[in-house]
Amino acid sequence: MEEAVPILLVDDQPLNLEALQAILDTTSCRFVLARSADEALLALLDQDFAAIVLDIRMPGMTGLELAKLIKGRKRTQHVPILFLTAHMIDERDALEGYGTGAVDYLTKPINPDVMRSKIAVFSELFRKSRALTQANEALQREVAERQRMEEALRESNQRLELRVEERTAELQDADRRKDEFLAALAHELRNPLAALHAAAEVFRIQTPPGSSLELPQGVILRQLRQMTRLVDDLLDVSRITRDKLILQPSRVDLSKVVSAALETSRPGIEQRGHRLTLRLPAEPVIVDADLVRLSQVFANLLDNAAKYTEPGGMIELTADQVSDEVVVRVADSGVGIDAAHLANIFDLFMQAERRPEHSHGGLGIGLTLVRRLVAMHGGSVSAHSEGRGKGSEFIVRIPMVRAGRSAFEALSLEPRDHGLEDVLRILIVEDNRDAAEMLNAMLASWGQDTRIAYDGLSAIEVAEELRPQVMLLDIGLPHLNGYDVARHIRQQAWSKDLLMVAVTGWGQEADKLRSSAAGIDHHLIKPVEPSTLKALLADFQALGVHAIHSRA
């Protein structure tokens, strides 16, 4: 039901008020009666009305005077007023009434129908006005609430943005400290690994053929290589995930890439007695690639195949030209991959437990490195397996380069053995005494003339005295670091024919750039494979210092 609309009836005669109320009784209105102007004003102070029915002639304050007061108040100035009069009024009186704000005149005796129709109109206008006011108030409340919520949301967003900035800074700082830790860890790990590698090489050289020491000597070499690979993989995946790894591409024959990968993976394949089959195109296949990084891809895949294949198994590496790509497949007869693991086999730290009863070791990052390195070369890699016990196959697709050099070296499946024909004067600068002594012993076993300096200042003094042909220079030295030593020595006239090689645990791209800027020809990461160092020295002897410098 609609709420009754309030109507103010003002007349000094009680009988007239009763008559008005009786006439309007069917209009769903609620009436407030006032017998004087004062009672009317008090009623107007108390509430709002849809209309005022006002007698003109009242004792004291007349209806016209009361109307002026009503129209003079802001709250009541728009309330419609109907004047009641028992006399005919002339034009001047009518104009005065309308001037006070009256909307109409009703002459007594009142026509009930006319009275009711007029009051009905004002009642409907009041209801609509009140509904509109209520809607406007509700809208204002909603706007205010929305503004309050927006302000709360803005403050919340500001707090969130501040927290995100703080958290981002914390993560960046943690990431920076992690990188610094990994770099320092790698350096600290590589120093003992370098000493162990050199000691193992001396051990190998001094072990007579057929000796019972050959077995433990082989174990030491294989495990050292594995430890070195783990350190390198850990640092590589850190660089790749932060987009810090920089490729150094050149046009290279795929056969050289595969040959380098085999040099790395051959010991593990031979140790487990696997039979390796290779099939490469007869013609050179040229790719635009970082030889070291792309060979790392195939070395990781070959290592994976060797690790997940029972001793005496089959491993096959094939390459085919398909349109503008070379497709390299590494397949094995190993334990296979469950279908559930194929979808995420390349995820970081993922190790498909292809033989639940055995652990195959590793950090679970080798295949992640494969995928990222292949992608950096503009290629793709996928894994396939028919299931457990049915082997697996990894397919690498790399874009080929059509134009290039016309001749390339043939693939050699046997490890290269570099001989040192002449004796070189070599200065070893290394603060880790074990690493220095073992490197010295290894070079001496190759017939080289060596001296050792254990810090940067001593290195300068010994170099000035010895005038070495080769300097193997650690970077992290006491008193004077390796970069400063290199810069000082490069200022000496006699150093123009000096081959300067950094042998260090610091292996990030920034470290290599600093080496180059300091005048260092090559930057080798500890532990250096004896064959790598011997090849560098042999090339130095065979090609001459200028060729070596031009390659650095």
Image (tube, rainbow, N blue to C red):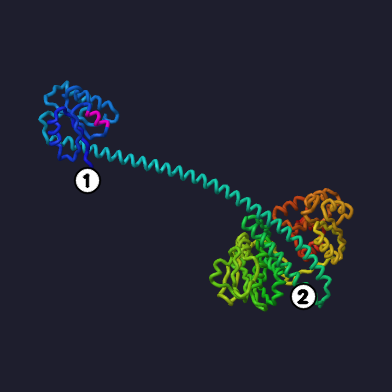
Residue at 80% in and 75% down? 213
Magenta-drawn stretch contains 356: no
The kind of residue tagged 1 is: Met
Closest to the observer: 80 or 504? 80
Q: Quadrant of the C terminus?
A: bottom right
Apparent side of residue 117 relative to residue 74 in the rendered image (left or right): left
Q: Quadrant of the N terminus?
A: top left
Region in magenta: 39-45
Q: Report the residue at 57% width, 47% height from top.
A: 165
Cα separation, mark 2 vs mark 1, equals: 104 Å
Picture disc at residue 1: 1
- Classify residue 204 by image quadrant: bottom right
N-term-proximal mark, 2 vs 1: 1
Amino acid type shown at disc 2: Leu
Name above or below for residue 22 compared with residue 73: below
What residue is disc 2 on?
215
Please state if 486 lies on the left or on the right of 120 as rendered. right
Q: Toward which corner of the image does residue 212 lie, by quadrant?
A: bottom right
**Circle 1 — which element?**
loop
